[in-house]
Image (cartoon, grey):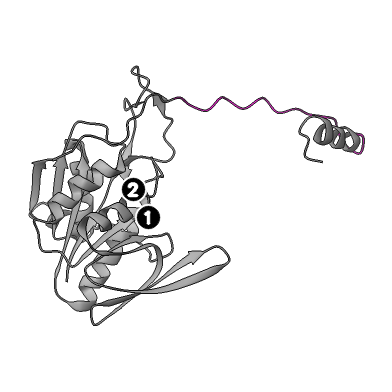
C-alpha cells in the first residue's frame, strides 16, 4: 500500500506569538518551529501499516517554506521512504488553496491512502482532510482514534459527543488522525543517518488564488490582574458577593 502523509511545519505550542508589522500575519523572528503534533500520529500510523504489510511506501509531503525541510528530514529519520516539499514563500492560511495544491500533487503519484493530522495546532480549522478527500474523490473519515485494516477496507473509530462511532471505509481514502491513535516514535541515530540518503524532492507549489484572506490579526486583550478578596472565613462573603455582582455567575 502506497501511503501519502500530509504534514505541516507549525510554531511550537510554547512560543510567544507576535503580530507582524503588516497586521495580517505573525512575526517569525525567534520563533521555534516543529512538526505539527497531530501529524505525528498520522506518520506513525502510516509506518505501522507499512510494517504490518511488509510492503508499500510512505511519502511525506508539506506545503511551506524551504525551512520546512527540517521537519521533512525528521519524518524521513523516523522511517518515511521519501519526502516532497511544495515550496512557497506565502503565508498560507486558506485550507481550500492548500488542499488544491496538495491534491494536484497527489494526483500525479500512486496513492492508496492519505493520512493527515486532524488539524494543525496553529490555525486549528480542521478543514484540510475533508477538502482534500472531496478534491481527490476519495472516501473520508476524520478524527480517527482507532484503526484496523483488512482486505483493503478500514474499520475506524472516532469519538463523538457522548459515544464512539465505528465506520468502515474502502481505499483509496483520506483519514485524519487524532491523539490516542498510537504512540509516535522518535528518530534514532540510525534513522537520522539513513535519512540523508533518502529521496528528497523540492518543487514550487501550484497555489490557486485564495478563497479566504486575512484582513487583520491581533492578539487577545490581556487578562485583568487577579483580585485578593481577603483571607480565611471573612473572604467567603466577599467572594460570594463578587461572583454575584461582578462576575454574575450566581
Write down the region rendered in magenta.
Answer: 218-234
> Residue 233 falls in which quadrant of the image?
top right
Quarter of the rendering containing residue 58: bottom left
- Residue hosting label 2: 36
Above or below for 34 versus 146: above
The disc placed on residue 174 is: none
Q: Camera-side residue: 132 or 21?
A: 132
Q: Is residue 174 magenta?
A: no
Q: Quadrant of residue 182 in the image?
A: bottom left
Q: At which x and y percent is residue 246? A: 79, 29
Q: Nearer the viewer, residue 17 or 163?
A: 163
Looking at the rendered image, the quarter that the N terminus falls into is bottom left
Residue beneath label 1, please? 118
Give yes or no for residue 229 being in the magenta stretch. Answer: yes
Indicate left or right for 58 with 127 as reference: left
> Quarter of the image containing the C terminus?
top right
Residue 249 point in image, percent of width and height: 77, 39
Q: Is residue 189 visible?
A: no
Task: Answer above or below: position of 141 versus 225.
Answer: below
Residue at x-position 25% and y-position 72%: 49
Looking at the image, residue 204 sits to the left or right of residue 138; the answer is left
Element assignment for label 2? loop
Amino acid at each position: 500500500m502506497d501511503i501519502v502523509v500530509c504534514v505541516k511545519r507549525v510554531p511550537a505550542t510554547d512560543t510567544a506569538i507576535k503580530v507582524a508589522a503588516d497586521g495580517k500575519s505573525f512575526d517569525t523572528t525567534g520563533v521555534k518551529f516543529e512538526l505539527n503534533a497531530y501529524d505525528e500520529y498520522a506518520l506513525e500510523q502510516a509506518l505501522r501499516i507499512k510494517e504490518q504489510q511488509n510492503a508499500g511506501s510512505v511519502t511525506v509531503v508539506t506545503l511551506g517554506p524551504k525551512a520546512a525541510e527540517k521537519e521533512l528530514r525528521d519524518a524521513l529519520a523516523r522511517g518515511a521512504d521519501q519526502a516532497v516539499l511544495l515550496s512557497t514563500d506565502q503565508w498560507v492560511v486558506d485550507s481550500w488553496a492548500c488542499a488544491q495544491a496538495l491534491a494536484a500533487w497527489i494526483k500525479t503519484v500512486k496513492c492508496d491512502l492519505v493520512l493527515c493530522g486532524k488539524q494543525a495546532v496553529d490555525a486549528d480549522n480542521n478543514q484540510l482532510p475533508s477538502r482534500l478527500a472531496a478534491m481527490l474523490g476519495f472516501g473520508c473519515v476524520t478524527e480517527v482514534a482507532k484503526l484496523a485494516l483488512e482486505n483493503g477496507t478500514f474499520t475506524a473509530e472516532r469519538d463523538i459527543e457522548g459515544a464512539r462511532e465505528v465506520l468502515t471505509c474502502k481505499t483509496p481514502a483520506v483519514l485524519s488522525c487524532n491523539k490516542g491513535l498510537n504512540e509516535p516514535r522518535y528518530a534514532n541515530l540510525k534513522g537520522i543517518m539513513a535519512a540523508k540518503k533518502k529521496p528528497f524532492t523540492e518543487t514550487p507549489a501550484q497555489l490557486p488564488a485564495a478563497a479566504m484572506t486575512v484582513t487583520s490579526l491581533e492578539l487577545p486583550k490581556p487578562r485583568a490582574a487577579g483580585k485578593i478578596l481577603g483571607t480565611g472565613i471573612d473572604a467567603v462573603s466577599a467572594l460570594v458577593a463578587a461572583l454575584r455582582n461582578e462576575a454574575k455567575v450566581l
